[in-house]
Amino acid sequence: MACLAAWRDTASRLLIRTLLNPRTRTHVNRLFAIVLAGLVGAATIATPVSGQIPNLRTGGTVPTLAPLVREVTPAVVNIAVHGKIRQDNPLYRDPLFREFFDVPKQLEKEINATGSGVIVDAQKGYVLTNNHVVDQVTTVQIKTKDGRQFSAKVVGRDPGTDIAVLRIQSPTALKAIAFGDSDALEVGDFVLAIGNPFGLGQTVTSGLVSALGRTGLGKHGYEDFIQTDAAINPGNSGGALVNLKGELVGINSAIISPAGGNVGIGFAIPVNMARRVMDQIVENGRVERGRIGISLRELNPATDGGRSEGARIAEVSPGSPAELAGLRKGDIVLKADDRPIHSAAQLRNRIGLARIGEQVRLTVERSGAPQIVTVAVGPATEASSSQSNGSVQRR
């Protein structure tokens, strides 16, 4: 300890002598300036830039999504429906059973249910929701965030995509939400789910885009779901999935739930698909399915040269629009209207939801070389939906 104290005293005397020496003072000042600049630079680097979460010190600003929520929630409405459904039991169709138990030929059960919807046109009063929210209903009541109630009518429904369009009668002082581009979503994007779970009233939850292009859930004929871990529960059906720009990117539709509640796996219909359906419903009252006359299969990296993105044409129907346009069996479709095609299901959705007569520009790979083929969409009959998965529940 004595040696350390002696060394410290010697160092102090040397520093004082150096600072008092005119020959060395300039160099010391220069060194001091360099050190001071470094400290200032380090402090500058440590200061949060725009877009980062600031330090939560006393008097600081706490990060919040409240301004975004205030902006978008007036466009999300609660939907209350009333109607009657037929109870379909094989025994009811048995004449001996009906006669013995004095049961009418068809039994009807009254239903009262709640769901959610999104105002997408404030002037005309158009509301997007799920088909299963308004299926077989006779009256629809819409309640806005500020407590006003409106009667609404069903403009049209599309079971294949589970989309329905309502129109508020005598719309007054409504607020619509802006459409986003669901094709621009990426896994990891932040999203908000807004709806009316369990009839509690408007509720906001947050999460991430967990996956894109989910298919094979067995609920609808055209599937291209956005998967999210934002909490979705019964009553959220038809509600909004919103990005952090305040844009509508999806219509909440289903969950996977062994016990009936949220477990972090929810699904929303991409807004680009919903808009295509809505446009046709508003114009024609229904959706007219398109076809070009091809069957597709998913790519297998093991047999397709390591490629997994795209869709291979398995068959081309003779005399079909596809054959007339020059498409061939074995072609790999990479893009549709310059948007990448990731799977056969995605291309099937794109063609199936195109308007009849619409020109679709396909980028295909044939014998290793890319080619552009433009094909006109022809009419098609509705394809039968796949069987239910059982564990996927519409919300």
Image: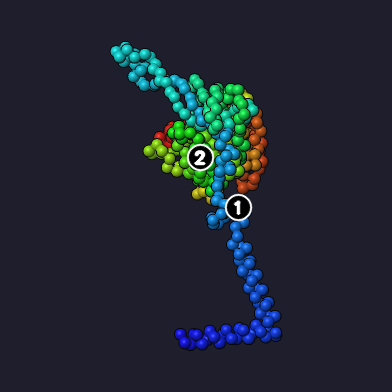
Q: Residue at x 54, y 86 (%)?
A: 9
Q: Quadrant of residue 152?
A: top right
Relative image position of residue 72 (x, y in whole percent): 58, 38
Q: Residue at x 62, y 37 (%)?
A: 178
| Mark linked to residue 350 | none
Q: Is residue 25 above or below residue 317?
A: below
Q: Residue at x 50, y 28 (%)?
A: 79
The mark tally for this picture is 2
> Within 10 Å of the Cα at label 1, are there few (<14), some (14-19), or many (20+) other Cα atoms?
few
Dot 2 corresponds to which residue? Answer: 204
Q: Quadrant of residue 352?
A: top right
Q: Nearer the viewer, residue 230 or 351?
A: 230
Q: Is residue 34 above or below residue 385?
A: below
Dot 1 corresponds to which residue? Answer: 51
Relative image position of residue 379 (x, y in whole percent): 60, 26
Q: Amino acid at mark 1?
A: Gly
Q: Are marks 1 and 2 in contact (CB under 8 Å)?
A: no
Q: Secondary structure at mark 1?
A: loop
For residue 296, say whether it is visible. no
Q: Secondary structure at mark 2?
A: strand
Q: Residue at x 61, y 32 (%)?
A: 175
Relative image position of residue 53 (x, y in whole percent): 56, 54
> Within 10 Å of the Cα at label 2, are there few (<14), some (14-19), or many (20+) other Cα atoms?
some
